[in-house]
Amino acid sequence: MKHISKLYLIIIFMALVALSFSSLFFLKESQNDKLRELSRYVIDDFQQGLAYENADLLSFSLALAENGALKNAITSDNEQEAYEILSEITKRFKKYTYIKTLRIQIFDNDLFIFAQSWGNASAGMPMWWFRNDLDKLKKDKRPKVGVETGRRLTFKATIPIQNGKTYIGYLEVIKFIDEFAKKLHQQGIELFALMDKKYLKDAPLMQDFPFLNRYIIANNNFNKKLKFKADFIDWEELESMGYFYRDKILYILEPMYNGAREEIGKYLMILPPESVITYREKYQNRSIFTRLSDSDVFKVVKLWEKPSDSYRDIEDKNLIDLLPKLKKEDRLDLEQKAKKVLQEYSKDELIDIILENRYKTKKIGEVR
């Protein structure tokens, strides 16, 4: 009897140990799922901000390329006048907007520097040997925008300038990535723009920039305390999972692509403990519908408003929708029933159904 009691105790003990390990495992998995979802939410916000930076820079470039005085300076080959126009534009932006690092330059049709807003000492210097991306722009004349390597890692929008139908040169607007990092800081995200070290040979202005892991930190306004912490995290896990969580700090890694969709580095986003709490609350309080795409929301609302679409009732709709899913031998009886149902519909109702199925939007037509 004593032997049986001991056996029961051992079994119970082993079961409790197994249960504890299972609980810890599921708790960890649950936490990982939550961190994964939170990271995705932060990345979505980040990508929207990145897209806005690119769109804003491209819009400004397109508008500036229509500047009549600038076109006149280019066509009359007046480098000094072009420099003065560009310089005045950047001065106004620095004075009246948050953009303090805006730079503008113009290349002629042969890809030589024509004018630069920060000084005209480089006028006449060829850029075709240094900038492979410009050769493609010269051929297809398509505007491009994105984060680009060079003397520094920057946002660049490069577009052709036209005078009527004639191409007279190329305009490039440059903005340092530090200002994007400043915006994210105000939202509670500390950004480290990490450029792959292989681009360092063409970046003379970044030779003394610090490294993090095997990357060069491209923005000067990074958080030095968090850099020290990031030096000692498990980078292998961070690169494998896309996120890393330690000491209540969340590290998120996202690929960095240039305008040609080539990976040139990484974005490391670090959320301090207070930012993790803020973003977690924002994510948890977010309506379920904001997690759906616009088309998903449209479908849900449409189903609420009229679940039967243009059919008279949901039974008719289900019957017609079912037909294509059945095998031929199973369709015979239902086809006869469907014909009888549709014979009760007017011509206009049938047109609505046909057009709705084809274009997914309601149309009104008339049978002649």
Image (cartoon, grey):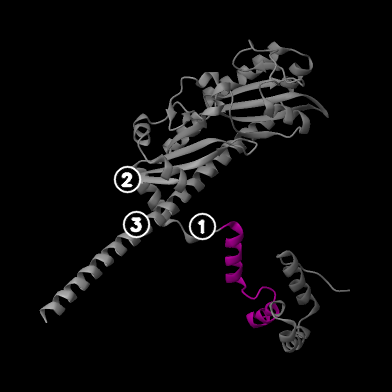
Q: Mark 2 — residue?
A: 248
Can you give x and y, in whole percent of width and height, for residue 239 in the image?
46, 43
Question: What amino acid type is highlighted by mark number 2?
Answer: Lys
Nearer the observer, 75 or 237? 237
Give the distance between the C-alpha atoms of the residues marked 1 and 2, in whole angstroms.
Answer: 25 Å
Amino acid found under the numbered disc labelled 1: Arg
> Residue drawn at (32%, 45%), measured in percent from left and top?
248
Q: Nearer the viewer, residue 195 or 119?
A: 195
Residue 306: say if magenta: yes
Q: In which quarter of the image is residue 335?
A: bottom right
Q: Is residue 301 left or right of residue 30?
A: right
On the image, numbered disc 3 is attached to which residue?
28
Instruction: Give amino acid for label 3.
Output: Lys
Report crowding for label 3: few under 14, some 14 to 19, many 20 or more residues within 10 A (C-alpha). Answer: few
The answer to the question of whether label 1 and label 2 lie on touching residues, with beta carbons closer than 8 A, is no
Identity of the residue drawn at 69% across and 25% down: 171
In magenta, the rendered stretch is 293-322
Q: How far is disc 2 from disc 3 in space, using C-alphas?
A: 15 Å
Label 2: which secondary element: loop
